[in-house]
Amino acid sequence: MSDEGNSAREIYQQFRGFIISGRLGSGERLPTVRQVAVDLGVAPGTAAKAYKLLEADGLVVSRTGAGTRVATTAALLPGGVVAAIRDLVDLAQQEGVKRDDVVSGFRAAWSGE
């Protein structure tokens, strides 16, 4: 996959996390593609590709003139799971653990490795 593809996937994952964790609520407007591109230092096409991935997953709805908003049907994680994730993040930060190490550990635990 190209660097642009990786960047679009990273942007997608970030916004997906915001949506399923409830940090971005139903009907809430996302920044414009142009603003995301400027903020993250990527090409507008890269940000647009990320938004298209979100739309394909049913997490956002894009309408000309109304922008891109979180879909009312976007599935959220259960509150207990969100709370546990926040607790894990807090603990990892207190312990000085790197995010990538926590993610790797989580993936290994999830898959039983």
Image (tube, rainbow, N blue to C red):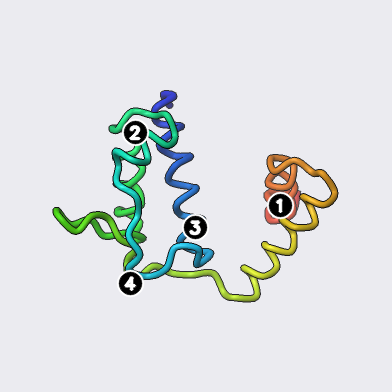
Q: Residue furthest bottom?
A: 79
- Give the class, few, some or many, for how many residues have Cα within 10 Å of label 4's Cα (few <14, many ≥20): some
Residue occupied by mark 1? 106
Q: Nearer the viewer, residue 109 or 32?
A: 32
**Callout 3: helix, strand or loop?**
helix
Which of the two discs, 1 and 3, labels the residue nearer the N terminus? 3
Look at mark 3 in the image and give the residue it sits on.
18
Whole-Å distance between the Cαs marked 1 and 3? 18 Å
Residue type beneath disc 3: Phe
**Could you tell me the amino acid type at mark 1?**
Phe
Q: Is residue 7 above or below residue 27?
A: above
Task: Give the camera-side residue of 70 and 74.
Answer: 70
Please name which of the two marks, 2 or 1, marks the residue nearer to the observer.
Answer: 2
Q: Is residue 65 left or right of residue 81?
A: left
Q: Secondary structure at mark 4?
A: loop
Residue at point 62% right, 68% down? 82
Is label 1 in a helix, a strand or a loop? helix
Q: What residue is drawn where x is 44% and y is 24%? A: 3
Residue at 39% across / 67% down in the picture? Answer: 74
Residue closer to the observer: 14 or 41: 41
Sequence-first disc among 2 and 3: 3
Residue 81 appears left or right of 76 = right
Would you name the residue on which mark 2 appears? 46
C-alpha distance separating marks 2 and 3: 19 Å
Kindly identify the amino acid type of the residue bearing the numbered disc 4.
Thr
